[in-house]
Amino acid sequence: MPPLMLALYINVLTAQASLIDHLHARHEHVAERRLAGDRGQATTEYALVLLAAAMVALLVIAWASAGGGAAKISRLFNRVIDAVIDRV
């Protein structure tokens, strides 16, 4: 390879590596800035989901223990178990 072509090739590779490093550093800076305003959001969302799940569970328990809910659940489980046994 002629020396001029080799020098050009090295310069292109160096410029490419420098550009990649610059873009990577910029991406990290943007990601850090974006995350700084979202701290604690995942914890809050997790707590709200747990509260909603607890409320649904309480409603199901209240429905199942009062009225005919227990009998309906018993029939449902019996049907499911019978269907599984019939397939085996």
Image: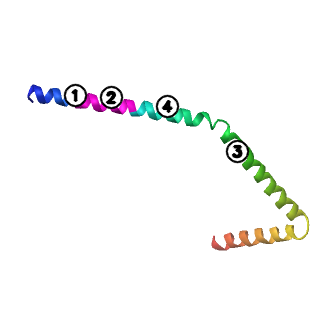
Discs 2, 1 touching: Cβ within 8 Å: no
Question: What residue lies at 69% left-to-right and 40% top-to-bottom?
Answer: 43
| Residue range highlighted in magenta | 10-22
Q: Earlier in the sequence, mark 4 or mark 1?
A: 1
Q: Which residue is mark 2?
A: 18
Q: Earlier in the sequence, mark 4 or mark 2?
A: 2
Q: Is residue 8 left or right of residue 79?
A: left
- Compute the Cα span from label 4 to label 3: 27 Å
Q: Nearer the viewer, mark 4 or mark 3?
A: 4
Q: Nearer the viewer, mark 1 or mark 3?
A: 1
SS type, badge 2: helix
Q: Which residue is mark 1?
A: 11
Q: Nearer the viewer, mark 2 or mark 3?
A: 2
- Compute the Cα span from label 2 to label 1: 10 Å
- Compute the Cα span from label 2 to label 3: 41 Å
Q: Earlier in the sequence, mark 2 or mark 3?
A: 2
The image position of residue 21, as x and y in percent, is 37, 30
For residue 29, the mark is 4
Quadrant location of the C terminus?
bottom right
Q: Earlier in the sequence, mark 1 or mark 3?
A: 1
For residue 46, the mark is 3
Observer-nearest residue: 14 or 57? 14
Q: Is residue 7 left or right of residue 33?
A: left
Give the amino acid at mark 4: His
